């Protein structure tokens, strides 16, 4: 009985660790995608001096922040990168 309980706890801990790694991978992949989009040539500026691409990227960045994928600090860093490139 004790071995089954210890095994169950170990399984649960391993599963949680893998979920954390999956979340990290997903966040890193989304950040890389946003950075790659930032490196693309800018489109014609829209009203306010921002390109449609920049506005779209800011929207995606906001969604990632709302979903909890990005922390407040990560969100601010990525937002500043986007705005400086605009």
Image (tube, grey):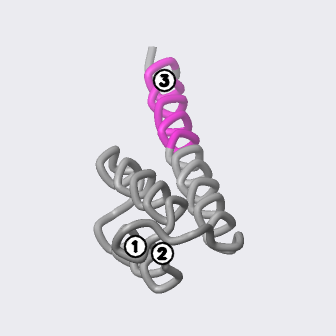
Q: Which of these two is toward me, 18 or 81?
A: 81
Q: Which of these two is toward me, 50 or 23?
A: 50
33 relative to 26, above or below = below
Position of residue 82 measured from the top left corner of the image (x, y, whole percent): 48, 75
Q: Is residue 82 magenta?
A: no
Q: Are marks 3 and 2 in contact (CB under 8 Å)?
A: no
What residue is shown with label 3? 8
82 relative to 12, above or below = below
What residue is shown with label 1? 79
Residue name at image x 53 percent, y 82 percent: 85
Residue name at image x 37 percent, y 48 percent: 63
Q: Which of these two is toward me, 34 or 3?
A: 34
Range covered by the magenta-colored residues: 4-19
Crowd class of label 3 (few under 14; some 14 to 19; many from 20; radius 10 Å): few
Q: CA distance from mark 3 to mark 2?
A: 45 Å
What residue is shown with label 2? 82
Position of residue 67 measured from the top left corner of the image (x, y, whole percent): 34, 44
Q: Secondary structure at mark 1?
A: helix
The nearer-to-camera label among 1 and 3 is 1
What number of labels is visible? 3
Quarter of the figure with the N terminus: top left
Crowd class of label 1 (few under 14; some 14 to 19; many from 20; radius 10 Å): some
Q: Which of these two is toward me, 57 or 4?
A: 57
Residue name at image x 42 percent, y 79 percent: 83
Q: Are marks 1 and 2 in contact (CB under 8 Å)?
A: yes
Determine the image quadrant of residue 36: bottom right
């Amino acid at each position: 009985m004790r071995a089954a309980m210890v095994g169950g706890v170990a399984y649960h801990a391993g599963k949680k660790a893998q979920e954390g790694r999956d979340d990290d991978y997903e966040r890193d992949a989304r950040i890389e995608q946003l950075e790659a989009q930032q490196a693309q040539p800018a489109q014609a500026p829209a009203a306010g001096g921002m390109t449609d691409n920049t506005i779209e990227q800011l929207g995606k960045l906001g969604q990632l922040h709302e979903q909890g994928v990005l922390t407040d600090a990560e969100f601010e860093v990525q937002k500043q990168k986007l705005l400086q490139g605009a």
